Image (tube, rainbow, N blue to C red):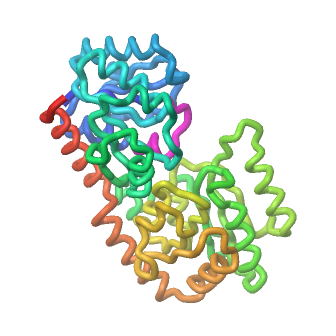
Amino acid sequence: MRILQICSAREIGGGERHLADLANNLATRGHEIFAAITPGSPLRSALSSVAAENIIELPMRNALNVRSGLRLARLVRERRIEIVHAHVARDYPLAALAAGRAGARLVLTRHVLFPLSKIHRLTLRRTSRVIAVSEAVADGLRAQNIFPADKIITIHNGIDVKRFELGSSGTGVPPVNNRTRVGTIGHLAPIKGQEEFIRAAAIVCGTRNDVDFIIAGEDKSRDGENRAHIEKVISDLDLKDRVQLTGWTDDVASLLATLDLFVSPARSEPFGLSIVEAMAAGVPVIATASEGAREIIDAEDSGRLVPIGDLAALAEAIADLLGDANQRERLALNARAVVNSKFTLERMVDRTEELYRAVIAGPE
């Protein structure tokens, strides 16, 4: 198959890692993969298995950039592309324009829970399929009634399980004096719950002095206000020696290999890729009962779920698991089995490949 992946993102996040993994694996399977990205996008280096001449850079600032849409249409027509697949909402209308003018099939992936806008209702009528990365995202799409329900398909994100099972030599933060380490990973933002993580850490630190807390993530706000707020919370709670802000790391597997416990304190989460990565790495997980976490974790079997915003419950779960090595081992083993059965990269690529074939074989 000849497939064009479109993404205007200027930073690498979960959705962009998903796109790169999908494109690279489809290329390895023998499909001719093309990618349209913005100038200077970090996705270029991530698309390691896609032929360099098949990666096209063009401005995609917003949904009304008709010139870029027409350029994409010409590319689709000239390269005889069969599937146009877009991953970011602002790219959907451009992808629809390109696919419609060139006679290709349009596939969208929805990575977030936010509702689509009026322009999407107007421009996406000829969408062949919409992939939701979780049932929670699929439910949100159905509620908007933009697409027929039978065109919305859930395909969970998948990860390279072997990379997390083996760990990776590199940039992980080494433990100090064999202290216990509890960590969380995600971009620094209120919705990710880092403040709740710190306040729960303060409760745990009140009874234990052998635990360090790690926050890995990048502040994507323009003025750095999210990191500044987190640093103030740490300072106000007198936790500078107990809570470490590491910034972002590209080697998540190495960082996870240093943790005894992983916490996802999100207020809302469409899927929860970092949860799956921690489970694959054999790190027991505690998560707030966000939309994505409830889909991934079987409570008390492959992880612990606590109410969103309940600091006491989060602190209690952390303290309980830190004090019970047998429970940590049991949860970690069960979690790895869940990842191997539901969230592998191979499964995600298989299901997406099947969807592409069905779209090409089906009616317009």
Q: Is residue 351 above or below residue 292?
A: above
Which is nearer the eye, 49 or 74?
A: 74
Does the magenta portion include 16?
A: yes
Q: Is residue 94 visible?
A: yes
Q: Position of residue 78 (x, y in %)?
A: 25, 12
Number of numbered discs: 0
- Please report the bounds of the magenta region as a residue range: 8-20
Q: Position of residue 205 (x, y in %)?
A: 75, 79
Q: Position of residue 105 (x, y in %)?
A: 25, 28
Q: Name the image quarter holding the N terminus.
A: top left
Q: Name the image quarter holding the C terminus.
A: top left
Residue 262 placement, left or right of 132: right
Q: Is residue 7 above or below residue 286?
A: above
Residue 265 placement, left or right of 242: left
Which is nearer the eye, 93 or 243?
A: 93
Q: Residue at x 36, y 43 (%)?
A: 21
Q: Residue at x 30, y 65 (%)?
A: 340
Q: Residue at x 46, y 14 (%)?
A: 66
Which is nearer the eye, 118 or 299?
A: 118
Q: Is residue 214 above or below residue 63?
A: below
Residue extending farthest to the left is 361
Q: Is residue 252 above or below residue 118?
A: below
Does the magenta portion include 81?
A: no
Q: Is residue 44 visible?
A: no
Q: Residue at x 38, y 57 (%)?
A: 135
Residue 352 placement, left or right of 243: left
Q: Position of residue 343 (x, y in %)?
A: 34, 59
